Image: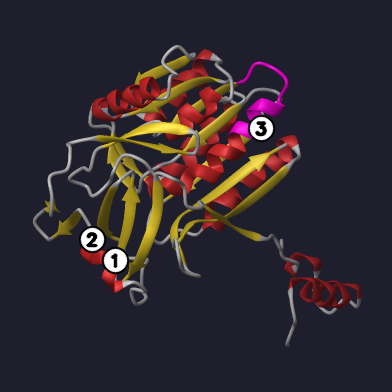
Amino acid sequence: MFFRNLSHLRKIVLAAWKKNRFPIRMMVRMKQCLVLETPRESDYELIDSGEGEKLERYGSVVLSRPDPQALWPKARPEAWEKKDGAFMSSRAEGKWVWKKNVPEKWRMSLGGLKFWIRPSTFKHTGVFPEQVPNWEWTSGLIRGAGRKVSVLNLFGYTGGATLAAAQAGAEVCHVDGSRVAIGWAKDNAALSDLSRKPIRWILDDAFSFVKREARRGKKYDGIIMDPPAFGHGPKRELWKIEKHMLGLLNVSYEILSEKPIFFLVNGYASGYSSMAYQNNLIALERSFGGTVEAGELSIPEALGARSLPAGIFARWRP
């Protein structure tokens, strides 16, 4: 059957249901899939992408990195000649190859915050620009709460979501299993003039920490999590998203306050759909009402019509 758009499809489904052409259990939840974009800023832009790579500018430094999502031709081949460094990966290891002298770390601004950029052996730079729309979303809900708000950020890495929440006025508990990442996040807080904000920096396994918080009866008004596909805690605690994610979500629901203001889950694990996260957060709709939305994070090219997929998300608000 042909349908012109989603509204037309709804009419067809409702008409068929009223005529009892199929049982109600076959009705589906039709939700809009959102695509959130991070636009170009003075210190950041996606210059071009394609052929399994992306070309970005962080401050004044232009970097190219592998990106398997970029399954299309490069639009500006000449721009790649001006890169300052490139991450080269192989089966054995990955490394950065530099065309000019670049500092070990340098500063940049993004989403109203400041960060230290430090290219790592895992091809990361220490900041994820695609998260800016989520920072803005959580910040707006915190400012609009009209009361004191506590936020838990799990797998907090170098602190972008933590700093955004603290800047908006929340008390934040930042949890990560890497001592290096927490040190980096603290440096970013200092750079953003947020060192005196009420932020607890916790070096711990995220799942273990949440279970202890549940036993202690601790509550949070907002929870953010950005779980990897695979990892280890500081005591070599194993994390596998397919084995531990559902348990982490269930315990996290237990530590929500009586009047929570948001729950946000980000994902980069290959092969997962945002619908998988959305289906879990529907439990919050049943408990607190509100709305669940999900979709993709993306970064549009500076001069083109294309956007680079950069992850998935699902989020709930009352």
Mark 1 Cα-neighbour bin, 10 Å: few <14, some 14–19, many ≥20? few
Quote the CA–CA distance across marks 3 and 1: 39 Å
Quarter the C terminus occupies: top right
Q: Which numbered disc, 3 or 1, marks the residue that appears first in the sequence? A: 1
The image shows residue 170 at horizontal and vertical percentages of 57, 21
Marks 1/2 in contact by CB < 8 Å: the verdict is yes
Tell me: 26 left or right of 251.
Answer: right
Residue 140 within the segment the image draws in magenta: yes
Q: Nearer the viewer, residue 50 or 198?
A: 50
Quote the CA–CA distance across marks 2 and 3: 41 Å
- Element assignment for label 1: helix
Residue 67 within the segment the image draws in magenta: no
- Residue in the image at 30% along x and 46% along y: 60
- Residue in the image at 70% along x and 23% along y: 258
Q: Is residue 56 above or below residue 254?
A: below
* Residue situated furthest right in the rendering: 19
Tell me: 57 left or right of 145.
Answer: left
**Residue beneath label 1, please?**
79
**Residue beneath label 3, please?**
141
Q: Mark on residue 82? A: 2
Amino acid type assigned to the residue bearing label 2 in the image: Lys
- Element assignment for label 3: helix
The image shows residue 225 at horizontal and vertical percentages of 47, 37
* Residue situated furthest bottom in the rendering: 1
The image shows residue 280 at horizontal and vertical percentages of 58, 47
What segment is highlighted magenta in the picture?
139-149
Amino acid type assigned to the residue bearing label 3 in the image: Leu
Q: Nearer the viewer, mark 2 or mark 3?
A: 2
Q: Which numbered disc, 2 or 3, marks the residue that appears first in the sequence? A: 2
